[in-house]
Amino acid sequence: MDNQRRLEAERTLERLMPRMVEHRRHLHRHPELSFQEARTSSWIAERLADIGCGSVRTAVGGFGIVAEWTGLEPGPTVALRADMDALPIEEETGADYASTVPGVMHACGHDAHTAGLLGVAAYYESLQGAFKGTRRLLFQPAEELTPGGAKPMIEDGALSGVDAIYGVHLWSPLPAGRVETRAGAFMAGVDEFTIDIVGRGGHGGMPQHTADAIVAGAALVTALQTIVSRNVSPLETAVVTIGSFQAGEASNIIAGHCRLKGTVRTFDLGVRDQIRARIRELTRSVCAGYGTEGRLDYREGYPPVINDEAEAARCLRTAAMLFGEDAAGLSELITAGEDFAYYLERIPGCFVFVGAGNPELGAVYPHHHPRFDIDESSMKQAALLLIGCAESFADANG
Ligand SMILES: [Zn+2]
Ligand SMILES: [Zn+2]
């Protein structure tokens, strides 16, 4: 992206900024939960029609929308993605654009992702074909709830013919103006599991006639801690958490049933498989050792977000070019998940955080908090960064 195009993009987005804010606030007032984004989806389609986009596909893998612009010069197809769903949280910001839907809130910033991508849409429309290749914008539903909205959109062709993909998450723990990502593993794969231990209950004073599910459960919880400490390589990162242990009714009754619930976070598919296999083995063998039976229900969530090396470097280079050398840097590993992982499993690309925190505006709360809010100026940066990455990729692969 040469200097002149950069300045033009900045000017265009500056001009579009009031509309992006208006769009974000509209979405913020009218949030919809994952897999229920019917109104949000048709609202986005209407805004794309206002902008004048000639190629819009609706109902892509559910409520997904794909909009496309093709330039006059041949070149690669680059996809840019925003998610659109909200969370089951009662908003407590007190903002005048606060949610009007009881118990539902845009508490992760997906309203701003969508508004920012509509800014990108207006930018490409304004170019009237003066760019190389094709830009495909993906408006994705249902990021917050597995199995997620990315997978069905991919199965419905959202990535067909796409050479690279980029996605932004506005991130309130980072100050507005900051851009961070990393090559390789960036965000965790997130799985969940439930273990039911079936023993034989009985009289608390006569344990010899029972198989105590609580004792087996306690031993199993302890044994599961050894997966990360004794089985996973010390050079890898993983989490195994038991967050729920439910058993028993009274002090004088030996429990015949115990239920454990936990989550697994990994940054490598091999480590994920290893942990899953060890949970299965320990559940079977520890429970059998205590005369009980362990039944594991392991549910795979999103895989880890693994950024392409070259595309992560491009993203940081582009951010430094757009916002200054000091603005871009290496992110730490993030133990939250993202279904952007499914796109990156198929094609090269990069997922990147754009800082949205600002104490002066009260944007200091974490994501998924009832008082979560963002510095709205970050939407312009997100849009510029997505455009910058797409143009850099097209210049390099023209
Ligand atoms: Zn979220
Ligand atoms: Zn999110």
Image: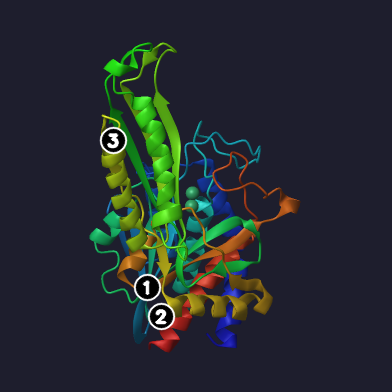
Task: List the residue tagged with mark 2.
Answer: 129
In the picture, measured across the screen, residue 243 lies left or right of residue 28, that is left
Q: Is residue 358 above or below residue 321?
A: above
Q: CA distance from mark 2 to mark 1?
A: 8 Å
Residue 177, x across and y down, in percent: 66, 66
Disc nearest the viewer among 3 and 1:
3
Q: Is residue 162 above or below residue 90?
A: below
What's the residue at 33%, 26% (across, down)? Answer: 213
Return the residue nearer the eye: 367 or 384.
Answer: 367
Return the residue nearer the eye: 81 or 329.
Answer: 329
Structural crowding at the residue carrying mark 1, measured as other residues with C-alpha within 10 Å and reported as few (<14), some (14–19) or many (≥20): many
Q: CA distance from mark 3 to mark 2?
A: 69 Å
Task: List the residue tagged with mark 3.
Answer: 289
Q: CA distance from mark 3 to mark 1?
A: 63 Å
Label 3 amino acid? Gly
Label 1 amino acid? Trp
Return the residue nearer the eye: 88 or 30.
Answer: 88
Quadrant housing the C terminus: bottom left
Q: Quadrant of residue 379?
A: bottom right
Q: Is residue 149 above or below residue 1?
A: above
Figure disc tally: 3
Label 2 amino acid? Gly
Task: List the residue tagged with mark 1.
Answer: 69
Give SS at disc 3: helix
In the picture, measured across the screen, residue 54 lies left or right of residue 11, that is left
Q: Residue furthest right?
A: 360
Give SS at disc 1: strand
Mark sitting earlier along the chain (3/2): 2
